[in-house]
Image (cartoon, rainbow, N blue to C red):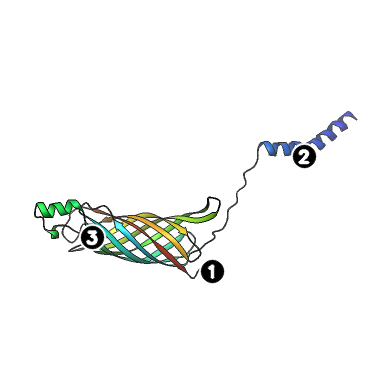
Amino acid sequence: MFRAFILSCLTLAAPALAQLDELENPGTVSAIQQRAYRMQHELTLSGGVLPLDAFYKGLYGQVAYTAHFTDHFAWQIGRFAYSYAAKTSLREQLERDFGVLPTSFEEVQFFFGSDVIWKPFYGKFSVLNNWVWHVEAFLLLGASAFKFTNVFRPGVNVGLGFRLFLNQWVSLRLDVTNNIVIPIGGGSQALTNVMCINLGLGFNFGATE
């Protein structure tokens, strides 16, 4: 009789003990949401700067087309940029005080290329509890061709980018890439770094969501 009483008490107490254990050691609950915005065919219009050269700063405009195959993978099939060289004070001093010819300086006049894009990061955050911004971060790997003052040179580039979705059709995009330019065709005999920083608008066409 006593044994049956003990078993009954344990049976009745088991749910309460389980609930107490759940409160003391809560489980992990994950909520993964689907992307609110998806890309398919993207036309990007942007402006940028080539900041590294000590003798000039390149200011350029760029147009690009990107095909987005999945939420995580895209191919920037083509991009073309035309650059204007703004002389630095160091270069002006060399030309003025030491008679260095303008042709002694190699400048990027235009460049074009193609990139593979991997988009592993996507999220949203609240701004002042009034707006929800959807953003993504991506990595780029590609190849470029640069037209310098007197020669064409190829290069390979790596970079990263950030996108702020304004709505389904328009997004604000920032790309930062570093190009390793190969010294062929005369002139410089060393590898050259050409950094590109550009900010622009991406226009999305064809997406169903």
- Direction right: furthest residue: 1
Image point (73%, 39%), residue name: 19
User: Three-letter amino acid code at disc 2?
Assistant: Pro
Whether the residues at callouts 3 and 1 have beta carbons within 8 Å, the answer is no
Q: Helix, strand, or loop for circle 1? A: loop
Q: Which residue is mark 1?
A: 208
Q: Which residue is mark 3?
A: 85
Image point (67%, 36%), residue name: 24
Relative to residue 203, is residue 137 depicted above or below? above
- Direction bottom: furthest residue: 206
Front: mark 2 or 3: 3
Q: Helix, strand, or loop for circle 2? A: helix
In the rendering, at what x and y percent does residue 198 appear?
A: 35, 58
Q: Which residue is mark 2?
A: 15
In the rendering, at what x and y percent does residue 65 appear?
A: 39, 67
Q: CA distance from mark 3 to mark 1?
A: 42 Å
**Label 2: few (<14), some (14–19) or many (≥20) C-alpha neighbours in 10 Å:** few
